[in-house]
Amino acid sequence: MLPSNHVVVLWGILLSSVAGCQSVPGARPAKTPLESGRPRPARAVAPSRTGEIRPVAHETPDSAARADSPGLPTPADAVGVVAAPDVTELTLEEVISIALTNNPDLVTASEQIAAADAVLCRARAEFYPKLGVSESYNASNNPVQVFMYALNEAQLDPTANFNNPGFGDIFQTQLGLQQNLYSGHRRWHAMDAAAAQRNGAAFQLEAIQNQLVFHAAEAFYRLLQAHVLVGVRREAVQQVEQHLQIVQSRYRNGTAVKSDVLSVEVRLAEVRQALITAQNQQELAWSVVENVVGGPIARRPLPAHVNAAPWTADVERIESAIAEAQGRRAEVSALASQGQAARQGIEIARAGKRLRADLMGTYDLYTSEFKRGNDSYFLGLVLQLNLFDGGRTDWDVEKAMARVRELRARQKRLMLDIELEVRRAHLNLVSAEKRLEVATQAIGQAEESLREIEARYRGQAATITQLIDSQVALSDAEVRKANAEAEVEIARAAVQRAIGRLTDMVGQ
Protein backbone atom coordinates (compact mmCIF):
# COMPACT_ATOMS: atom_id res chain seq x y z
CA MET A 1 0.00 0.00 0.00
CA LEU A 2 1.09 3.56 -0.66
CA PRO A 3 1.79 5.99 2.18
CA SER A 4 -1.18 8.22 2.98
CA ASN A 5 0.67 11.41 2.05
CA HIS A 6 1.47 9.94 -1.40
CA VAL A 7 -2.22 9.24 -1.96
CA VAL A 8 -3.08 12.79 -0.93
CA VAL A 9 -0.58 14.15 -3.46
CA LEU A 10 -2.02 11.98 -6.21
CA TRP A 11 -5.56 13.19 -5.60
CA GLY A 12 -4.29 16.75 -5.31
CA ILE A 13 -2.91 16.45 -8.84
CA LEU A 14 -6.26 15.22 -10.06
CA LEU A 15 -8.15 18.15 -8.56
CA SER A 16 -5.63 20.83 -9.56
CA SER A 17 -5.35 19.70 -13.18
CA VAL A 18 -9.07 19.46 -13.92
CA ALA A 19 -9.31 23.09 -15.00
CA GLY A 20 -6.14 22.85 -17.10
CA CYS A 21 -7.15 19.89 -19.26
CA GLN A 22 -10.94 19.93 -19.38
CA SER A 23 -12.07 20.84 -22.88
CA VAL A 24 -15.00 20.41 -25.17
CA PRO A 25 -14.34 17.91 -27.99
CA GLY A 26 -13.44 19.82 -31.13
CA ALA A 27 -12.67 23.04 -29.27
CA ARG A 28 -9.42 24.82 -30.11
CA PRO A 29 -6.77 24.50 -27.37
CA ALA A 30 -5.73 27.55 -25.40
CA LYS A 31 -3.24 29.89 -27.07
CA THR A 32 0.39 29.03 -26.71
CA PRO A 33 2.79 31.35 -24.86
CA LEU A 34 4.25 32.55 -28.17
CA GLU A 35 0.77 33.16 -29.58
CA SER A 36 -0.71 35.01 -26.65
CA GLY A 37 2.29 37.03 -25.55
CA ARG A 38 2.79 35.08 -22.33
CA PRO A 39 6.32 34.56 -21.05
CA ARG A 40 8.20 32.05 -23.17
CA PRO A 41 9.47 28.81 -21.65
CA ALA A 42 12.72 29.34 -19.82
CA ARG A 43 15.60 29.12 -22.25
CA ALA A 44 18.00 26.25 -21.80
CA VAL A 45 21.49 26.97 -20.63
CA ALA A 46 23.98 26.63 -23.46
CA PRO A 47 25.19 23.01 -23.43
CA SER A 48 28.71 22.40 -22.30
CA ARG A 49 31.49 21.51 -24.68
CA THR A 50 31.50 17.98 -23.24
CA GLY A 51 28.28 17.24 -25.09
CA GLU A 52 26.01 17.01 -22.03
CA ILE A 53 22.47 18.11 -22.74
CA ARG A 54 21.42 20.26 -19.84
CA PRO A 55 17.76 20.25 -18.88
CA VAL A 56 15.57 23.10 -20.00
CA ALA A 57 13.11 24.61 -17.58
CA HIS A 58 9.54 24.30 -18.77
CA GLU A 59 6.22 25.78 -17.88
CA THR A 60 4.32 24.32 -14.98
CA PRO A 61 1.19 22.30 -15.84
CA ASP A 62 -1.00 25.10 -14.55
CA SER A 63 0.70 27.88 -16.50
CA ALA A 64 -1.92 27.61 -19.26
CA ALA A 65 -4.44 29.17 -16.89
CA ARG A 66 -2.71 32.55 -16.93
CA ALA A 67 -4.55 35.37 -18.64
CA ASP A 68 -3.74 36.28 -22.21
CA SER A 69 -1.92 39.50 -22.90
CA PRO A 70 -1.19 41.38 -26.14
CA GLY A 71 1.91 40.12 -27.83
CA LEU A 72 2.95 38.06 -30.79
CA PRO A 73 0.59 37.87 -33.76
CA THR A 74 -1.01 34.47 -34.28
CA PRO A 75 -1.06 32.70 -37.63
CA ALA A 76 -4.37 33.07 -39.45
CA ASP A 77 -6.58 30.03 -39.86
CA ALA A 78 -7.14 30.83 -43.52
CA VAL A 79 -4.94 32.36 -46.18
CA GLY A 80 -6.50 35.21 -48.10
CA VAL A 81 -5.71 38.32 -50.07
CA VAL A 82 -4.10 40.99 -47.92
CA ALA A 83 -5.61 44.24 -49.10
CA ALA A 84 -4.06 47.60 -48.31
CA PRO A 85 -6.39 50.40 -47.20
CA ASP A 86 -4.25 53.07 -48.88
CA VAL A 87 -1.49 53.51 -51.44
CA THR A 88 1.37 54.15 -49.05
CA GLU A 89 4.72 52.57 -49.77
CA LEU A 90 5.18 48.95 -48.78
CA THR A 91 7.65 48.65 -45.91
CA LEU A 92 9.80 45.86 -44.54
CA GLU A 93 7.99 45.94 -41.20
CA GLU A 94 4.67 45.50 -42.96
CA VAL A 95 5.90 42.52 -44.96
CA ILE A 96 7.21 40.90 -41.78
CA SER A 97 3.93 41.57 -39.97
CA ILE A 98 1.87 40.03 -42.78
CA ALA A 99 4.15 36.99 -42.90
CA LEU A 100 3.90 36.43 -39.15
CA THR A 101 0.11 36.61 -39.41
CA ASN A 102 -0.50 34.71 -42.61
CA ASN A 103 2.30 32.22 -43.23
CA PRO A 104 1.04 28.61 -43.14
CA ASP A 105 4.30 27.34 -41.62
CA LEU A 106 3.38 29.14 -38.40
CA VAL A 107 -0.08 27.55 -38.49
CA THR A 108 1.60 24.16 -38.76
CA ALA A 109 3.91 24.89 -35.83
CA SER A 110 1.02 26.23 -33.74
CA GLU A 111 -1.01 23.09 -34.37
CA GLN A 112 1.99 21.00 -33.33
CA ILE A 113 1.96 22.89 -30.04
CA ALA A 114 -1.77 22.19 -29.75
CA ALA A 115 -1.07 18.49 -30.32
CA ALA A 116 1.67 18.60 -27.66
CA ASP A 117 -0.81 20.25 -25.27
CA ALA A 118 -3.21 17.37 -25.89
CA VAL A 119 -0.46 14.83 -25.18
CA LEU A 120 0.36 16.63 -21.92
CA CYS A 121 -3.29 16.62 -20.85
CA ARG A 122 -3.50 12.97 -21.82
CA ALA A 123 -0.54 12.23 -19.53
CA ARG A 124 -2.25 14.09 -16.68
CA ALA A 125 -5.42 12.11 -17.27
CA GLU A 126 -3.59 8.93 -16.22
CA PHE A 127 -3.89 10.13 -12.63
CA TYR A 128 -7.69 10.11 -12.88
CA PRO A 129 -9.87 7.07 -12.20
CA LYS A 130 -11.83 5.43 -15.00
CA LEU A 131 -15.55 5.32 -14.35
CA GLY A 132 -17.97 3.63 -16.72
CA VAL A 133 -21.47 2.28 -16.90
CA SER A 134 -22.83 -0.59 -18.97
CA GLU A 135 -26.22 -2.17 -19.56
CA SER A 136 -26.59 -5.74 -20.81
CA TYR A 137 -29.46 -8.16 -21.44
CA ASN A 138 -29.02 -11.93 -21.39
CA ALA A 139 -31.53 -14.69 -22.13
CA SER A 140 -31.03 -18.48 -22.10
CA ASN A 141 -32.66 -21.85 -21.36
CA ASN A 142 -29.35 -23.34 -20.18
CA PRO A 143 -29.92 -24.62 -16.63
CA VAL A 144 -26.70 -23.17 -15.29
CA GLN A 145 -27.38 -19.75 -16.82
CA VAL A 146 -31.01 -19.67 -15.68
CA PHE A 147 -29.90 -20.70 -12.19
CA MET A 148 -27.33 -17.87 -12.11
CA TYR A 149 -29.92 -15.36 -13.37
CA ALA A 150 -32.27 -16.23 -10.53
CA LEU A 151 -29.44 -16.25 -7.98
CA ASN A 152 -28.13 -12.81 -9.05
CA GLU A 153 -31.67 -11.45 -8.98
CA ALA A 154 -32.24 -12.96 -5.49
CA GLN A 155 -35.30 -14.72 -6.84
CA LEU A 156 -34.14 -18.36 -6.58
CA ASP A 157 -37.03 -20.79 -6.06
CA PRO A 158 -35.87 -23.85 -4.05
CA THR A 159 -38.76 -25.94 -5.45
CA ALA A 160 -37.84 -25.27 -9.10
CA ASN A 161 -36.64 -28.04 -11.36
CA PHE A 162 -32.99 -27.14 -11.78
CA ASN A 163 -32.49 -29.72 -14.50
CA ASN A 164 -35.18 -28.15 -16.66
CA PRO A 165 -35.79 -24.59 -15.46
CA GLY A 166 -37.13 -23.39 -18.80
CA PHE A 167 -36.46 -19.91 -20.23
CA GLY A 168 -34.81 -17.19 -18.21
CA ASP A 169 -33.57 -13.66 -18.87
CA ILE A 170 -32.03 -10.80 -16.94
CA PHE A 171 -30.98 -7.14 -17.28
CA GLN A 172 -27.66 -6.23 -15.72
CA THR A 173 -26.66 -2.62 -15.00
CA GLN A 174 -23.02 -2.25 -13.96
CA LEU A 175 -21.06 0.76 -12.71
CA GLY A 176 -17.34 0.11 -12.90
CA LEU A 177 -14.35 1.93 -11.35
CA GLN A 178 -10.64 1.51 -12.08
CA GLN A 179 -7.88 3.51 -10.42
CA ASN A 180 -4.16 3.02 -10.70
CA LEU A 181 -2.55 3.62 -7.32
CA TYR A 182 1.09 3.06 -8.23
CA SER A 183 2.94 2.25 -11.44
CA GLY A 184 6.59 2.74 -10.59
CA HIS A 185 6.36 6.51 -11.16
CA ARG A 186 5.63 5.86 -14.84
CA ARG A 187 2.86 8.46 -14.92
CA TRP A 188 5.02 11.15 -13.32
CA HIS A 189 7.80 10.64 -15.83
CA ALA A 190 5.32 10.49 -18.72
CA MET A 191 3.86 13.83 -17.64
CA ASP A 192 7.31 15.43 -17.38
CA ALA A 193 8.25 14.05 -20.79
CA ALA A 194 5.06 15.44 -22.33
CA ALA A 195 5.72 18.85 -20.75
CA ALA A 196 9.26 18.85 -22.18
CA GLN A 197 7.96 17.91 -25.62
CA ARG A 198 5.43 20.71 -25.41
CA ASN A 199 8.20 23.19 -24.59
CA GLY A 200 10.20 21.81 -27.50
CA ALA A 201 7.27 22.48 -29.84
CA ALA A 202 7.07 26.05 -28.55
CA PHE A 203 10.78 26.58 -29.19
CA GLN A 204 10.35 25.12 -32.67
CA LEU A 205 7.73 27.79 -33.33
CA GLU A 206 10.20 30.44 -32.20
CA ALA A 207 12.83 29.01 -34.52
CA ILE A 208 10.40 29.11 -37.44
CA GLN A 209 9.60 32.73 -36.62
CA ASN A 210 13.30 33.58 -36.65
CA GLN A 211 13.66 31.95 -40.07
CA LEU A 212 10.47 33.53 -41.38
CA VAL A 213 11.51 37.07 -40.49
CA PHE A 214 14.77 36.53 -42.37
CA HIS A 215 13.02 35.11 -45.44
CA ALA A 216 10.56 38.02 -45.39
CA ALA A 217 13.44 40.52 -45.22
CA GLU A 218 15.34 38.73 -47.98
CA ALA A 219 12.27 38.62 -50.24
CA PHE A 220 11.56 42.31 -49.59
CA TYR A 221 15.09 43.42 -50.46
CA ARG A 222 15.15 41.20 -53.54
CA LEU A 223 11.98 42.95 -54.58
CA LEU A 224 13.61 46.34 -54.03
CA GLN A 225 16.58 45.18 -56.11
CA ALA A 226 14.27 44.27 -58.98
CA HIS A 227 12.28 47.49 -58.57
CA VAL A 228 15.39 49.70 -58.73
CA LEU A 229 16.65 47.69 -61.69
CA VAL A 230 13.38 48.30 -63.58
CA GLY A 231 13.64 52.02 -62.90
CA VAL A 232 17.21 52.20 -64.13
CA ARG A 233 16.48 50.13 -67.23
CA ARG A 234 13.39 52.21 -68.04
CA GLU A 235 15.42 55.41 -67.72
CA ALA A 236 18.08 53.94 -70.03
CA VAL A 237 15.41 53.14 -72.63
CA GLN A 238 14.10 56.71 -72.48
CA GLN A 239 17.61 58.13 -72.91
CA VAL A 240 18.39 55.94 -75.91
CA GLU A 241 15.01 56.76 -77.47
CA GLN A 242 15.83 60.47 -77.15
CA HIS A 243 19.23 59.91 -78.74
CA LEU A 244 17.60 57.97 -81.57
CA GLN A 245 15.28 60.87 -82.29
CA ILE A 246 18.26 63.25 -82.38
CA VAL A 247 20.29 60.98 -84.68
CA GLN A 248 17.33 60.42 -87.00
CA SER A 249 16.81 64.19 -87.21
CA ARG A 250 20.50 64.71 -88.02
CA TYR A 251 20.39 61.94 -90.60
CA ARG A 252 17.46 63.63 -92.32
CA ASN A 253 19.41 66.90 -92.28
CA GLY A 254 22.50 65.21 -93.68
CA THR A 255 24.69 65.76 -90.59
CA ALA A 256 24.76 62.05 -89.61
CA VAL A 257 25.26 58.82 -91.49
CA LYS A 258 23.05 55.76 -91.64
CA SER A 259 25.44 53.73 -89.52
CA ASP A 260 24.88 56.13 -86.62
CA VAL A 261 21.14 55.47 -86.77
CA LEU A 262 21.66 51.73 -86.96
CA SER A 263 24.05 51.78 -84.01
CA VAL A 264 21.54 53.62 -81.82
CA GLU A 265 18.73 51.29 -82.91
CA VAL A 266 20.84 48.30 -81.91
CA ARG A 267 21.50 49.90 -78.52
CA LEU A 268 17.79 50.62 -78.13
CA ALA A 269 16.94 46.97 -78.77
CA GLU A 270 19.50 45.92 -76.16
CA VAL A 271 18.22 48.24 -73.42
CA ARG A 272 14.61 47.30 -74.19
CA GLN A 273 15.47 43.65 -73.82
CA ALA A 274 17.21 44.44 -70.53
CA LEU A 275 14.04 46.26 -69.40
CA ILE A 276 11.86 43.25 -70.22
CA THR A 277 14.20 41.01 -68.23
CA ALA A 278 14.11 43.41 -65.30
CA GLN A 279 10.31 43.55 -65.35
CA ASN A 280 10.11 39.77 -65.33
CA GLN A 281 12.50 39.68 -62.39
CA GLN A 282 10.35 42.18 -60.54
CA GLU A 283 7.20 40.11 -61.14
CA LEU A 284 9.02 37.02 -59.91
CA ALA A 285 10.20 38.94 -56.85
CA TRP A 286 6.56 39.85 -56.08
CA SER A 287 5.67 36.15 -56.32
CA VAL A 288 8.45 35.27 -53.87
CA VAL A 289 7.16 37.87 -51.41
CA GLU A 290 3.65 36.46 -51.69
CA ASN A 291 5.00 32.96 -51.13
CA VAL A 292 6.80 34.07 -47.97
CA VAL A 293 3.89 36.03 -46.51
CA GLY A 294 1.53 33.16 -47.26
CA GLY A 295 -0.88 34.60 -49.82
CA PRO A 296 -1.53 37.22 -52.49
CA ILE A 297 -0.64 40.75 -51.51
CA ALA A 298 -1.96 43.90 -53.15
CA ARG A 299 0.57 45.63 -55.37
CA ARG A 300 1.83 48.70 -53.53
CA PRO A 301 4.30 51.45 -54.38
CA LEU A 302 7.83 50.52 -53.36
CA PRO A 303 10.55 52.75 -51.90
CA ALA A 304 12.71 54.38 -54.54
CA HIS A 305 15.85 53.46 -52.62
CA VAL A 306 17.01 50.56 -50.47
CA ASN A 307 16.31 51.57 -46.90
CA ALA A 308 18.21 50.21 -43.91
CA ALA A 309 16.56 47.54 -41.77
CA PRO A 310 15.86 48.22 -38.06
CA TRP A 311 18.63 45.82 -37.02
CA THR A 312 21.29 47.45 -39.20
CA ALA A 313 23.54 48.93 -36.51
CA ASP A 314 23.41 45.93 -34.16
CA VAL A 315 26.31 43.77 -35.32
CA GLU A 316 29.21 43.01 -32.98
CA ARG A 317 32.41 41.00 -32.85
CA ILE A 318 32.24 37.52 -34.32
CA GLU A 319 33.25 35.59 -31.18
CA SER A 320 30.69 37.27 -28.97
CA ALA A 321 28.09 36.73 -31.68
CA ILE A 322 28.86 32.99 -31.74
CA ALA A 323 28.56 32.74 -27.97
CA GLU A 324 25.26 34.58 -28.01
CA ALA A 325 23.91 32.42 -30.83
CA GLN A 326 24.77 29.16 -29.06
CA GLY A 327 22.92 30.31 -25.96
CA ARG A 328 20.05 32.11 -27.68
CA ARG A 329 18.98 30.06 -30.70
CA ALA A 330 15.60 28.43 -30.19
CA GLU A 331 16.85 25.27 -31.90
CA VAL A 332 19.26 24.74 -28.97
CA SER A 333 16.44 25.05 -26.45
CA ALA A 334 14.19 22.79 -28.52
CA LEU A 335 16.88 20.10 -28.62
CA ALA A 336 17.46 20.46 -24.88
CA SER A 337 13.73 19.92 -24.31
CA GLN A 338 13.86 16.80 -26.45
CA GLY A 339 16.83 15.62 -24.38
CA GLN A 340 14.86 16.10 -21.18
CA ALA A 341 11.95 14.13 -22.62
CA ALA A 342 14.35 11.36 -23.68
CA ARG A 343 15.77 11.07 -20.16
CA GLN A 344 12.25 10.77 -18.82
CA GLY A 345 11.75 8.00 -21.40
CA ILE A 346 14.50 6.00 -19.69
CA GLU A 347 12.63 6.16 -16.38
CA ILE A 348 9.37 5.25 -18.09
CA ALA A 349 11.02 2.13 -19.52
CA ARG A 350 12.55 1.19 -16.16
CA ALA A 351 9.12 1.37 -14.55
CA GLY A 352 8.28 -1.83 -16.42
CA LYS A 353 10.05 -3.82 -13.67
CA ARG A 354 8.47 -2.00 -10.75
CA LEU A 355 5.41 -2.87 -8.71
CA ARG A 356 2.02 -1.89 -10.08
CA ALA A 357 -1.05 -1.47 -7.87
CA ASP A 358 -4.57 -1.02 -9.20
CA LEU A 359 -7.87 -0.56 -7.41
CA MET A 360 -11.01 -1.80 -9.10
CA GLY A 361 -14.63 -2.04 -8.11
CA THR A 362 -18.07 -2.66 -9.57
CA TYR A 363 -21.63 -2.07 -8.54
CA ASP A 364 -24.21 -4.32 -10.26
CA LEU A 365 -27.98 -4.20 -10.42
CA TYR A 366 -29.87 -7.29 -11.68
CA THR A 367 -33.54 -7.36 -12.67
CA SER A 368 -35.77 -9.13 -15.14
CA GLU A 369 -38.89 -7.04 -14.93
CA PHE A 370 -37.75 -3.63 -13.63
CA LYS A 371 -40.02 -4.04 -10.58
CA ARG A 372 -37.77 -6.00 -8.30
CA GLY A 373 -34.22 -7.12 -8.39
CA ASN A 374 -30.99 -7.34 -6.48
CA ASP A 375 -27.75 -5.34 -6.29
CA SER A 376 -24.20 -6.23 -5.37
CA TYR A 377 -20.76 -4.70 -5.28
CA PHE A 378 -17.20 -5.83 -5.71
CA LEU A 379 -13.99 -4.15 -4.56
CA GLY A 380 -10.52 -5.47 -5.23
CA LEU A 381 -6.85 -4.55 -5.11
CA VAL A 382 -4.52 -5.99 -7.74
CA LEU A 383 -0.73 -6.06 -7.29
CA GLN A 384 1.46 -6.89 -10.28
CA LEU A 385 5.21 -7.37 -10.46
CA ASN A 386 7.11 -8.26 -13.61
CA LEU A 387 9.39 -11.18 -12.71
CA PHE A 388 10.46 -12.14 -16.21
CA ASP A 389 9.55 -10.70 -19.61
CA GLY A 390 12.25 -12.11 -21.85
CA GLY A 391 14.31 -8.90 -21.67
CA ARG A 392 11.57 -6.65 -23.09
CA THR A 393 12.00 -4.03 -20.40
CA ASP A 394 15.79 -4.10 -20.64
CA TRP A 395 15.64 -3.51 -24.38
CA ASP A 396 13.14 -0.68 -23.89
CA VAL A 397 15.62 0.93 -21.48
CA GLU A 398 18.47 0.47 -23.96
CA LYS A 399 16.39 2.04 -26.72
CA ALA A 400 15.63 5.07 -24.53
CA MET A 401 19.30 5.45 -23.60
CA ALA A 402 20.28 5.30 -27.28
CA ARG A 403 17.83 8.12 -27.92
CA VAL A 404 19.58 10.24 -25.28
CA ARG A 405 22.98 9.53 -26.84
CA GLU A 406 21.60 10.41 -30.26
CA LEU A 407 20.35 13.76 -29.01
CA ARG A 408 23.73 14.52 -27.44
CA ALA A 409 25.41 13.92 -30.79
CA ARG A 410 22.79 16.04 -32.56
CA GLN A 411 23.42 18.79 -30.01
CA LYS A 412 27.15 18.76 -30.77
CA ARG A 413 26.40 18.96 -34.50
CA LEU A 414 23.94 21.81 -33.92
CA MET A 415 26.49 23.84 -31.97
CA LEU A 416 29.04 23.37 -34.74
CA ASP A 417 26.50 24.32 -37.40
CA ILE A 418 25.49 27.45 -35.49
CA GLU A 419 29.11 28.54 -35.21
CA LEU A 420 29.58 28.00 -38.95
CA GLU A 421 26.38 29.88 -39.77
CA VAL A 422 27.45 32.88 -37.73
CA ARG A 423 30.94 32.93 -39.23
CA ARG A 424 29.61 32.55 -42.77
CA ALA A 425 27.00 35.26 -42.26
CA HIS A 426 29.60 37.61 -40.79
CA LEU A 427 32.00 37.03 -43.70
CA ASN A 428 29.20 37.57 -46.20
CA LEU A 429 28.37 40.85 -44.46
CA VAL A 430 31.97 42.05 -44.63
CA SER A 431 32.13 41.10 -48.31
CA ALA A 432 28.81 42.84 -49.07
CA GLU A 433 29.93 46.03 -47.33
CA LYS A 434 33.15 46.08 -49.37
CA ARG A 435 31.20 45.54 -52.59
CA LEU A 436 28.93 48.43 -51.64
CA GLU A 437 31.96 50.65 -51.06
CA VAL A 438 33.35 49.75 -54.48
CA ALA A 439 29.96 50.24 -56.16
CA THR A 440 29.60 53.66 -54.56
CA GLN A 441 33.00 54.72 -55.89
CA ALA A 442 32.09 53.38 -59.32
CA ILE A 443 29.07 55.69 -59.43
CA GLY A 444 31.31 58.75 -59.12
CA GLN A 445 33.69 57.43 -61.74
CA ALA A 446 30.84 56.67 -64.17
CA GLU A 447 29.36 60.14 -63.65
CA GLU A 448 32.73 61.79 -64.31
CA SER A 449 33.20 59.67 -67.45
CA LEU A 450 29.72 60.61 -68.71
CA ARG A 451 30.41 64.33 -68.21
CA GLU A 452 33.64 64.01 -70.20
CA ILE A 453 31.99 62.09 -73.05
CA GLU A 454 29.11 64.58 -73.18
CA ALA A 455 31.58 67.46 -73.48
CA ARG A 456 33.48 65.66 -76.23
CA TYR A 457 30.23 64.79 -78.01
CA ARG A 458 29.17 68.44 -78.02
CA GLY A 459 32.57 69.25 -79.51
CA GLN A 460 32.05 66.46 -82.06
CA ALA A 461 35.07 64.62 -80.66
CA ALA A 462 33.03 61.58 -79.57
CA THR A 463 30.43 59.48 -81.32
CA ILE A 464 26.84 58.94 -80.28
CA THR A 465 27.68 55.29 -79.58
CA GLN A 466 30.35 56.33 -77.09
CA LEU A 467 27.85 58.65 -75.40
CA ILE A 468 25.23 55.91 -75.13
CA ASP A 469 27.81 53.44 -73.83
CA SER A 470 28.80 55.92 -71.16
CA GLN A 471 25.19 56.42 -70.09
CA VAL A 472 24.59 52.66 -69.98
CA ALA A 473 27.75 52.27 -67.91
CA LEU A 474 26.40 54.78 -65.41
CA SER A 475 23.09 52.90 -65.30
CA ASP A 476 24.91 49.64 -64.70
CA ALA A 477 26.89 51.25 -61.88
CA GLU A 478 23.65 52.46 -60.28
CA VAL A 479 22.24 48.94 -60.55
CA ARG A 480 25.34 47.47 -58.93
CA LYS A 481 25.10 49.96 -56.08
CA ALA A 482 21.41 49.19 -55.50
CA ASN A 483 22.19 45.47 -55.58
CA ALA A 484 25.06 45.96 -53.14
CA GLU A 485 22.86 47.97 -50.77
CA ALA A 486 20.26 45.21 -50.78
CA GLU A 487 22.92 42.54 -50.33
CA VAL A 488 24.27 44.40 -47.30
CA GLU A 489 20.82 44.45 -45.70
CA ILE A 490 20.24 40.79 -46.50
CA ALA A 491 23.65 39.92 -45.05
CA ARG A 492 22.88 41.87 -41.90
CA ALA A 493 19.57 40.05 -41.60
CA ALA A 494 21.42 36.76 -42.05
CA VAL A 495 23.74 37.65 -39.17
CA GLN A 496 20.78 38.43 -36.95
CA ARG A 497 19.06 35.20 -38.00
CA ALA A 498 22.20 33.16 -37.26
CA ILE A 499 22.35 34.70 -33.78
CA GLY A 500 18.61 34.16 -33.27
CA ARG A 501 17.62 37.77 -32.74
CA LEU A 502 14.99 38.16 -35.43
CA THR A 503 12.29 36.84 -33.12
CA ASP A 504 12.63 40.21 -31.39
CA MET A 505 10.79 41.61 -34.41
CA VAL A 506 7.77 39.50 -33.54
CA GLY A 507 5.06 41.56 -31.94
CA GLN A 508 6.71 44.93 -32.71
Image (tube, grey):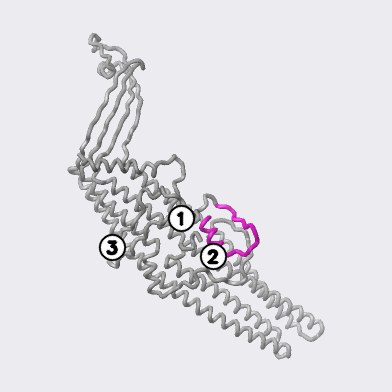
Asked whether 313 or 84 is in front, the reply is 313
Residue type at mark 2: give it.
Ala
- The residue depicted at 58 percent of the width and 69 percent of the height is 224
Highlighted magenta segment, given as a residue range: 79-101
Name the residue tied to disc 2. Answer: 219
Q: Nearer the viewer, mark 1 or mark 2?
A: 1
Tally of numbered tags: 3
Name, please, the residue furthest toward the left. Answer: 387
* Mark 3 secondary-structure assignment: loop
Where is residue 207? Give x, y as percent: 43, 60
Describe the element under mark 2 as helix, strand or loop.
Answer: helix
User: Which residue is the extreme one toward the right?
Assistant: 253
Is tag 1's residue or tag 3's residue first in the polypeptide sequence?
Answer: 1
Give the alpha-carbon distance from disc 3 to disc 2, as whole Å: 38 Å
The front one of 458 and 201 is: 201
In-image side of 295 versus 329 (left or right): right
> Do residues under tags 1 and 2 come within 8 Å of each other at their CB atoms?
no
Residue type highlighted by circle 3: Glu
Disc 3 versus disc 2: nearer the observer: 3
Q: Is residue 292 magenta?
A: no
Residue 205, horizontal then vertical, whole percent: 43, 56
Residue at (60% x, 81% y) in the render? 443
| Observer-nearest of 297 and 71 | 71
Residue 97 included in the magenta stretch of the image: yes
Q: Measure the alpha-carbon separation of dots 1 and 2.
A: 27 Å
Q: Mark 3 points at which residue?
A: 52
**Of the residues shown, which amino acid type is indicated by label 1?**
Gly
How many neighbours does mark 2 have within 10 angstroms: few (below 14), some (14-19), or many (20 or more)?
many
Classify 234 as above or below 382.
Answer: below
Which residue was labeled with disc 1? 37
At numbered mark 1, what does the secondary structure look like: helix, strand or loop? loop
